[in-house]
Image (cartoon, coloured by chain):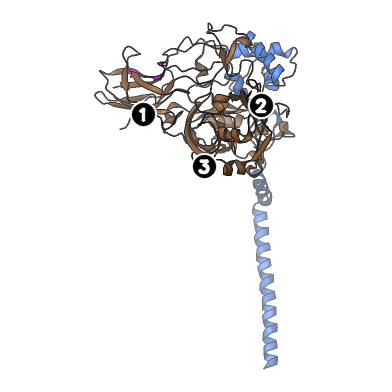
Chain colours: A blue, B brown
Amino acid sequence: MQEHAKFKQQVKAIYRLMAGLFGLFIVAAIGILLLVSNPDWTRKKATEVESEYVAIPEVDDFDKIENGIHVRTGLIEADGLMTVVNNCTNCHSAKLVTQNRMNAERWIATIKWMQETQNLWDLGKNEEIIVNYLVTNYPAKKKGRREVLSNIEWYDLED
Amino acid sequence: MKRRNFVKRATLGSMASVIGADIVFGSVLPEGYKPLALQDPDPFKMFNKDTGMEVLNDKPWNIEAKAHLLDDKITPNKFMFIRNNGLIPENIDADKWTLEFDGESVAQKKTYTLAELKSKFPQYTYELTLECGGNGRSEFDPPAKGNQWTIGAVSCASWTGIRLKDVLEDVGIKDDAVYIGYHAADVHLSRDPGKEPISRGAPMAKALQEETLLAFKMNNEDIPIAHGYPLRLVAGGWPASVSGKWINRISIRNKVHDGTKMTGTAYRVPCNPVAPGEKVKDEDMCIIESMPVKSLITYPKSGAMINEGEKLDIRGHAWAGELEVERMEYSIDFGSTWQSCPIEKPSNRLAWQHFSASIDFPKKGYYEIWARATDSRGASQPMLLPGWNPKGYLNNACHRIAIKVT
């Protein structure tokens, strides 16, 4: 009885080994077949995975201009743009610049105020470039004592 | 869509300001890639604001509401304007938060923990109107420098806290006390630790009012970070800049507080009226105290079209700084005739008041509904812009909405 059981165990072990080898063979065969039919199979998969995490950096795009607008800041592309970007958007948003519409005298006074109280550096020759850019591209609009209502979005009022 | 673009356009600088550190190698960051700390820099999500709110500035963050968003009697956070002078403080630990009292006129320097303040003094809840001094600035001509607020820099939330007056009594103040000045944890835009973005305050009379709170709850919850968590001043009816956020020190001064944005032209208007565009010397500028009488039509949203023969129900709020609104009127004929409408009493002093009306239109056509409030001293809102001032404060001109009867 004991010997019979031992024999049964040995048969089982051999069977398991054969089954394992067969499985490995099948996997290898599928792999080879795939590689033969589509040599880029492994590489393609690898790049697909990568593309989820990495955008290919294009340094030029950082100051991309689209439809005449400097995308990163929203400023209009014109003479002096990068001088304005480099001197006026470090501490505050460009939105603070474009919201405001002033003449040269008041921009100069504003620059002086920023230098006296907000740690703005000496702009040297750039001051003229910046002020010219601002008064040319963001001129003051006449509003009078009360503007008409504009940009009204009409809609049917439901009860 | 515009908002998305704007978020995309957010500069590295503003990313750095939110993260709280400069982004090293920022210039080689791939376009469209957001640093981990900022995976979602959408300000509407970041501050839990309604996407109908208008971002005026992203560094520092300044966001305003629109009239129809302010329809609630008590303004919820999602519709509350954000006004910042500096960068929102980071790593706030409420458990370690302290409030120090110092200054020339303090009997003795004293420091309280936030927990002590909450447990030692009785708590009060008030609905308090906070309006930015520059609300309405965008309408001035010649234009005034600063964030171009239209009408949405106003709110009336329910604030819970302790009376500043109770704490000042506990601290002890000398007879020569003139003003209190707050100091806070926000960071100057230049990141210069020696500079405060804003340090304003109020005369003792305002500081000692029952409704002037050291608040730690807004609408019954912890104050949202952008609105001053864990501790702020709330001084209703005065320019909202008096209601300092994230405050950690109060100086009791023997003179008018001279902190940042107390001096020069900040939160000041000409002591005597000037012509539009006129230059005004600093010494001729006076500090704004109570805000003027004003109102907003919050329903319907401007642009409503109704059928001929239908009545139009309107409603809104009115407020008058330190005073109360006594009369409310509207006009559908550009001020030729005015109709009175009911105005509710405020739920407490310095809370905004609610009005409503039901309007008949005589015939088809384009109309504007103009609203005009009058305060308890008889002052009304002007239909045109009020007196020009160099910084564009205190525009309380009548609000109006456009209506078509078809």
Q: Earlier in the sequence, mark 3 or mark 1?
A: 3
Q: Nearer the viewer, residue A133 or B53?
A: B53
Tell me the crowding category of disc 2: few under 14, some 14 to 19, or many 20 or more residues within 10 angstroms, Cα based: many
Circle 1 sits in a helix, a strand or a loop, which is it? loop
Q: Amino acid at mark 2?
A: Ser
Of circles 3 and 2, the one toward us is 2
Percent position (x, y) of residue B252?
Answer: 64, 27
Q: Amino acid at mark 3?
A: Glu
Percent position (x, y) of residue B124?
Answer: 50, 38
Query: Which residue position is annotated with label 1?
Result: B344
> Is residue B370 on the magenta stretch?
yes
Marks 1 and 2 sit apart, C-alpha to C-alpha, by 41 Å
**Residue B300 seen:** no
Of circles 3 and 1, the one toward us is 1
Q: Quadrant of residue B327?
A: top left
Q: Nearer the viewer, residue B37 or A115?
A: A115
**Residue A153 seen:** yes
Chain ID of residue with mark 1: B
Give the residue drawn at x 73%, y 27%: B194
Q: Quadrant of the C terminus of chain B?
A: top left
Chain ID of residue with mark 3: B
Query: Which residue position is annotated with label 2?
Result: B105
Mark 3 on the same chain as mark 2 = yes
Q: Which mark is residue B221?
A: 3
Q: Nearer the viewer, residue B166 or B125?
A: B166
Circle 3/circle 2 CB separation < 8 Å: no
Percent position (x, y) of residue B227?
Answer: 56, 34
